[in-house]
Image: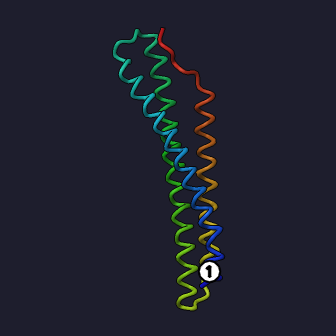
């Protein structure tokens, strides 16, 4: 069991990193939702030209929220695979099964989900910095 505990340390650090990414994504999601609510509250009182600009920003915000949601989903899936990997390592040690291929596959799936998360995060950031922001006059 001591060897399994030593091997489980690296995935536990990976879980910490995934948790940090989820926290950062959650902050971005909250800011996007707050901005959407602010624009929606002001939309009824805007003149036609300003309303068009506000609606264009709302469409981009909706895309950003969708990307952040998918990134959080991917990060959670990655974290679940890491948890299964750790559980599989201990299960294999307790019942003396060779689960090395299964554990390796779970690690690969965790990394693929984390890569998807980071790419979606990057896409959301690109949308956030490349979109002009509506500022009322």
Image coordinates of residue 95 in percent, x first then y, are 53, 91
Of 47 and 133, the residue lying toward us: 133
Q: Residue at x 55, y 81 (%)?
A: 90
Residue 8 x/y as whole percent: 61, 73
Circle 1 crowding by C-alpha within 10 Å: few under 14, some 14–19, many from 20: some
70 shown above or below 85: above
Furthest-front residue in this view = 2
Q: Secondary structure at mark 1?
A: helix
The x, y position of residue 36, in whole percent, is 43, 29
- Residue name at image x 52 percent, y 76 percent: 87
Residue 30 placement, left or right of 21: left
Image quarter of the N terminus: bottom right
- Residue lying farthest to the bottom in this orientation: 96
Q: Which residue is mark 1?
A: 4
Q: How many marks?
A: 1
Left of 66 or right of it: where is 99?
right
User: As displayed, is residue 10 above or below residue 130?
Assistant: below
Where residue 111 appears, as percent x and y from the top left, is 64, 61
The relative height of residue 128 versus residue 134 in the rendered view (above or below) is below
Instruction: Please report the residue visible at 48 percent of the width from the left and 33 percent of the height from the top.
Output: 32
In the displayed structure, would residue 131 be above or below residue 106? above
**Quadrant in which residue 93 is drawn:** bottom right
Q: Residue at x 49, y 17 (%)?
A: 53
Q: How is the image coloured?
A: rainbow
């Amino acid at each position: 069991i001591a060897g399994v505990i030593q091997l489980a340390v690296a995935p536990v650090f990976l879980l910490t990193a995934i948790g940090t990414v989820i926290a950062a994504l959650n902050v971005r999601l909250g800011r996007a939702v707050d901005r959407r609510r602010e624009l929606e509250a002001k939309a009824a009182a805007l003149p036609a030209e300003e309303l068009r600009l506000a609606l264009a920003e709302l469409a981009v915000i909706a895309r950003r929220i969708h990307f952040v949601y998918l990134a959080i989903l991917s990060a959670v899936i990655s974290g679940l695979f890491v948890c299964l990997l750790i559980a599989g390592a201990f299960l294999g040690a307790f019942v003396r099964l060779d689960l090395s291929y299964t554990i390796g596959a779970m690690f690969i799936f965790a990394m693929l989900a984390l890569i998807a998360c980071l790419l979606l995060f990057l896409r959301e950031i690109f949308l956030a910095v490349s979109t002009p922001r509506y500022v009322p006059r």
